[in-house]
Image (cartoon, rainbow, N blue to C red):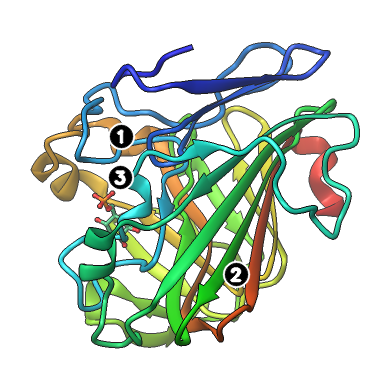
Amino acid sequence: TKDWNGIDQVVLRSPHGASARVSLYGGQVTSWRNDHGEELLFTSSKAIFKAPKAMRGGIPICFPQFGNGGSTELHGFARNKIWMIEDSPPPLHLNDSHGKSFVDLLLKPSDDDMKCWPHRIFVIPSSFEFRLRVSLAADGVLNMISRIRNVNGKPFSFSFAYHTYFSVSDISEVRIEGLETLDYLDNLCQKERFTEQGNAITFESEVDRVYVSAPNAIAILDHEKKRTFVIRKEGLPDIVVWNPWEKKSRAMGDLGDEEYKQMVCVDGAAIVRPITLKPGEEWTGRMQLKVVPSSFCSDH
Ligand code: BG6
């Protein structure tokens, strides 16, 4: 099928009715639905479905940088590029295709991308291949595996995030568990470092943080919907938590004034210590999303 830009998108389906959509624009997952057809990812009603801006919602990929570390392109260029479908990618070490519906995408850089690679904290790279596999398991679990390879020349560094917009019923009823006692960099205080004091993260104003070295499983509890998202990650040490709250939402053209209540961004990420790849080296970053009824979530 086609997405909003007339660009191809791929629909993945599970035998029990779950589905996911992946656009070749940005390699962005734009929808993830459970067996009952309920949408689990947030998309703004004011989202601009038009290049050159990533659509506000789903899972845009931030690469080669999260934030604006030296380049003009906030969150990197990958989310604004057209990716290709790759029929036979190099094999993954882990067997990720068994019983799953999946798609393999590939992004290779253009010369222009190289010009806006962030050089302040990064070495200018030669060239890379970015392979993304998105798969949907029979039980509706969504898996994303990114493989980034330095294909020639000099070493380069990057930061990365799966900028995941979860759909929630009411942000004031949401708790995030698994980040307690961790250090975080607060984007609202010039990236100053603090230590999380609460038992769980709750929301009563704007939050824009990078939690450092987070555990590999964390949970978002949606009290009103009685469901929990479980995020598992590998190769992604950090977790971003973002909600723009009221004032910032009003200032954003592609987010409704009240829509901050229905979303929370929680990203599996590698930000605090950028990843450096020598020529020929490859990095893998994996995120798995699962939704469970709240009564069954004590084992996350
Ligand atoms: C967050 C950043 O993760 O992403 C915010 O920390 C930023 O500062 C937000 O506003 C959204 O970014 P964008 O480019 O999608 O509007």
The residues bearing labels 1 and 3 have C-alpha atoms spaced at a distance of 9 Å
Residue 68 vertical placement versus 10 (above, below): below
Residue position marked by numbered label 3 in the rendering = 80
The quarter of the picture where residue 189 lies is bottom left
The quarter of the picture where residue 88 lies is top right
Number of marks present in the image shown:
3
Q: Residue at x 47, y 87 (%)?
A: 155
Single out the mark in the foreground, 1 or 3.
3
Residue 229 vertical placement versus 293 (above, below): below
Residue 7 visible in image: yes
Ligand 1 location (quadrant) = bottom left
Provide residue 187's location: percent of width, then percent of height. Answer: 28, 73
Single out the mark in the foreground, 2 or 3.
3
Residue 90 vertical placement versus 270 (above, below): above
Residue position marked by numbered label 1 in the rendering = 55
Q: Label 1, secondary structure: give it.
A: loop
Q: Residue at x 74, y 53 (%)?
A: 90
Residue position marked by numbered label 2 in the rendering = 179
The residues bearing labels 1 and 2 have C-alpha atoms spaced at a distance of 28 Å
Give the crowd class for mark 3: few <14, some 14-19, many >=20 residues within 10 Å.
many
* Left or right, residue 247 beside residue 203: left
Give the crowd class for mark 1: few <14, some 14-19, many >=20 residues within 10 Å.
many
Whichever of callouts 2 and 3 sits on the residue coming sooner in the sequence is: 3
Task: Compare residues 248 and 107 and report the one nearer the observer.
Answer: 107
Residue 272 vertical placement versus 83 (above, below): below
Whichever of callouts 1 and 3 sits on the residue coming sooner in the sequence is: 1
